[in-house]
Image (cartoon, grey):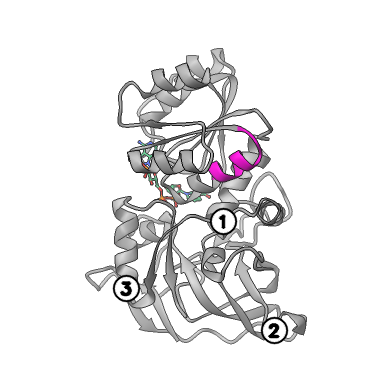
C-alpha cells in the first residue's frame, strides 16, 4: 500500500512509499483509510524532535475510513462501517494517568497517512452522523486532548471564565468549541487577528493578540480573570497566564511549543492558590465521552485545508509555519 513514512534521507524528511503491513491480528480490523489529519506531533517526528523515532514508520495519528476486514475474534458487524480511530493505544484502566504501555498511533506503530491501517477493534468508533469522513478524521487526537483538559481536569461548567490560548492550534479550536458548547464564558488568544475574528464568529466573547504586550491588561479588564486556562505554548508566556488567572484558578497545559519557562514565579502560584495541571491525550472513557459530547452538540471540526497524499510534505510545511486555522486534512481516497 502507499503510505507516508518518516525518511531522514529525503529532503522533506518524509516520503511516499510502498509499505507492507504485518498480518491482521485476531483482535484487529483493517480499515481502508479515506482521510488522515495532522497534529503537531507529526511535524515534531519529521523534525526528529520526538523520542524513539525511526525511519520507515507510517506517520499519522488521526484517521477515518471504512472497515474492510476483521480479525478472527472481531464481530463481523463492523464490516463496511464508517469509523474513526482513537489514537491512544493501551491507555490502561486508570483514569488519572496512562499505563506504561501507552503509545500514540503513528510512531512507533504504523499510523494513518496510508491506504490501510491495522488497529485493535477497541480503538475504533462509529463516525458521528453529522460529520463527513474528512471532518471525522480531524477529530480524534485533538478532540480527545481538549476534552480531557476541559472536562476531566478543569471540570468546566456553565458561566466559568475560560481562556484558550493559540486558537489557531488543532487542540485549541476544539477546546474553544467545547467550552462554548458547555456555556462557559470563553475567550481566546492568537497571534493572528483573522483567527481572533473566526473565534468570535463561533461564539467566543473576545480575543486577545498575544503579540501585543498589553494583552493581559485588556484580558483582565474584559473578563475579570480566568477560572480555567488551556495552553500548550508555555515558555515565558506562563508568567502572563499566572497574571490573568483568577485566585483559585487552574492552568491546564498539554504542550510546550515555546519550550520550558526559564523561571517560575512560585509566589504567584501559592499566594493565588493556582493549580498548574498537566494533561496528555485521554483514556478510552474520555474518548467515549468526547464523542458523545460531539454528537450531542453537533460539534464540527474547523478544517483549514485538504491535501492529497502525494502533497503530504506541503501539508507538513503548512503546520510547521503555523499558518493553519484548524485542522489540516490529508485525503487518501
Ligand atoms: N500532551 C498531549 O496529549 C498533546 C496533544 C496534542 C498536542 N500536544 C502538543 O501541544 C502543542 C500544540 O499542538 P497542536 O497539534 O494543537 O499544534 P498546532 O495545531 O500546530 O498549534 C500550535 C499553535 O500554537 C499557538 N501559539 C504559538 N505561539 C503562541 C504563544 N506565544 N501563545 C499562545 N499560543 C501560541 C499558535 O496559535 P495561533 O495560530 O492562534 O497564533 C499555533 O497555531 C504541540 O506542542 C503538541 O506537541 C500535546
Q: Quadrant of the N terminus?
A: bottom left
Residue furthest toward the front? 201
Position of 332 with respect to 157 (left or right) is left
Disc 2 C-beta below 8 A from ligand 1: no
Q: CA distance from mark 1 to mark 2?
A: 26 Å
Q: Residue at x 39, y 43 (%)?
A: 195
Give the vertical position of 170 relative to 307 (above or below): above
Q: Residue at x 53, y 66 (%)?
A: 137
Q: How many C-alpha atoms fall within 10 Å of the one at disc 1: few (<14), some, or many (≥20)? A: some
Task: Check residue 311 in the rendering and tell me which mark sits there, or answer none.
Answer: 3
Given this view, does label 1 or label 2 mark the residue nearer the observer?
Answer: 1
Task: Check residue 21 in the rendering and tell me which mark sits there, or answer none.
Answer: none
Residue 47 lies in quadrant:
bottom left
Q: How many C-alpha atoms fall within 10 Å of the one at disc 3: few (<14), some, or many (≥20)? A: some
Q: What percent of the width, then of the height, locates residue 219?
A: 44, 23
Q: CA distance from mark 3 to mark 1?
A: 25 Å
Position of 170 with respect to 309 (left or right) is right
Residue in front for this viewpoint, 158 or 14: 158
Disc 1 C-beta below 8 A from ligand 1: no
Magenta part of the protein: which range? Answer: 175-184
Residue 25 lies in quadrant:
bottom right
Give the vertical position of 274 relative to 173 (above or below): above
Given this view, does label 3 or label 1 mark the residue nearer the observer?
Answer: 1
Check disc 1 and report the residue beneath it. 300
Residue 122 lies in quadrant:
bottom right
Residue in front for this viewpoint, 182 or 289: 182
Give the vertical position of 302 relative to 264 (above or below): below
Q: Residue at x 26, y 68 (%)?
A: 12
Give the vertical position of 42 relative to 185 (above or below): below
Position of 293 with respect to 252 (left or right) is right
Check disc 2 and report the residue beneath it. 79
Q: What percent of the width, then of the height, locates residue 6?
A: 36, 70
Amino acid at each position: 500500500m502507499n503510505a507516508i513514512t518518516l525518511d531522514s534521507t529525503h529532503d522533506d524528511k518524509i516520503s511516499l512509499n510502498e509499505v507492507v503491513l504485518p498480518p491482521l491480528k485476531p483482535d484487529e480490523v483493517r480499515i481502508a483509510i479515506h482521510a488522515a489529519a495532522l497534529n503537531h506531533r507529526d511535524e515534531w517526528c519529521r523534525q526528529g524532535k520526538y523520542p524513539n523515532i525511526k525511519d520507515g514508520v507510517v506517520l499519522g495519528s488521526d484517521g477515518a475510513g471504512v472497515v474492510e476486514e476483521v480479525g478472527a475474534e472481531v464481530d463481523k458487524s463492523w464490516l463496511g462501517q464508517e469509523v474513526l480511530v482513537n489514537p491512544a493505544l493501551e491507555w490502561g484502566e486508570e483514569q488519572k494517568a496512562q499505563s506504561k504501555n501507552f503509545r500514540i498511533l503513528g510512531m512507533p506503530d504504523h499510523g494513518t497517512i496510508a491506504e490501510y491501517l491495522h488497529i485493535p477493534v477497541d480503538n475504533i468508533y462509529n463516525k458521528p452522523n453529522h460529520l463527513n469522513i474528512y471532518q471525522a478524521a480531524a477529530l480524534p487526537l485533538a478532540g480527545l486532548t481538549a476534552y480531557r483538559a476541559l472536562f476531566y481536569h478543569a471540570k468546566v461548567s456553565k458561566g466559568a471564565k475560560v481562556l484558550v490560548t493559540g486558537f489557531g492550534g488543532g487542540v485549541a479550536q476544539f477546546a474553544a468549541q467545547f467550552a462554548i458548547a458547555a456555556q462557559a464564558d470563553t475567550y481566546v488568544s492568537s497571534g493572528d487577528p483573522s483567527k481572533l475574528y473566526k473565534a468570535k464568529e463561533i461564539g467566543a466573547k473576545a480575543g486577545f493578540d498575544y503579540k501585543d504586550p498589553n494583552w493581559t491588561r485588556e484580558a483582565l479588564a474584559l473578563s475579570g480573570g480566568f477560572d480555567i486556562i488551556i495552553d500548550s505554548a508555555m515558555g515565558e508566556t506562563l508568567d502572563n497566564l499566572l497574571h490573568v488567572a483568577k485566585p483559585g484558578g487552574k492552568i491546564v497545559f498539554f504542550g510546550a511549543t515555546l519550550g520550558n519557562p526559564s523561571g517560575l514565579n512560585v509566589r504567584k502560584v501559592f499566594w493565588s492558590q493556582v493549580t498548574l495541571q498537566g494533561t496528555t491525550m485521554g483514556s478510552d472513557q474520555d474518548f467515549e465521552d468526547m464523542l458523545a459530547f460531539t454528537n450531542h452538540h453537533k460539534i464540527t471540526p474547523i478544517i483549514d485545508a485538504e491535501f492529497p497524499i502525494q502533497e503530504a510534505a506541503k501539508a507538513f510545511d503548512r503546520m510547521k509555519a503555523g499558518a493553519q486555522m484548524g485542522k489540516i486534512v490529508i485525503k487518501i481516497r
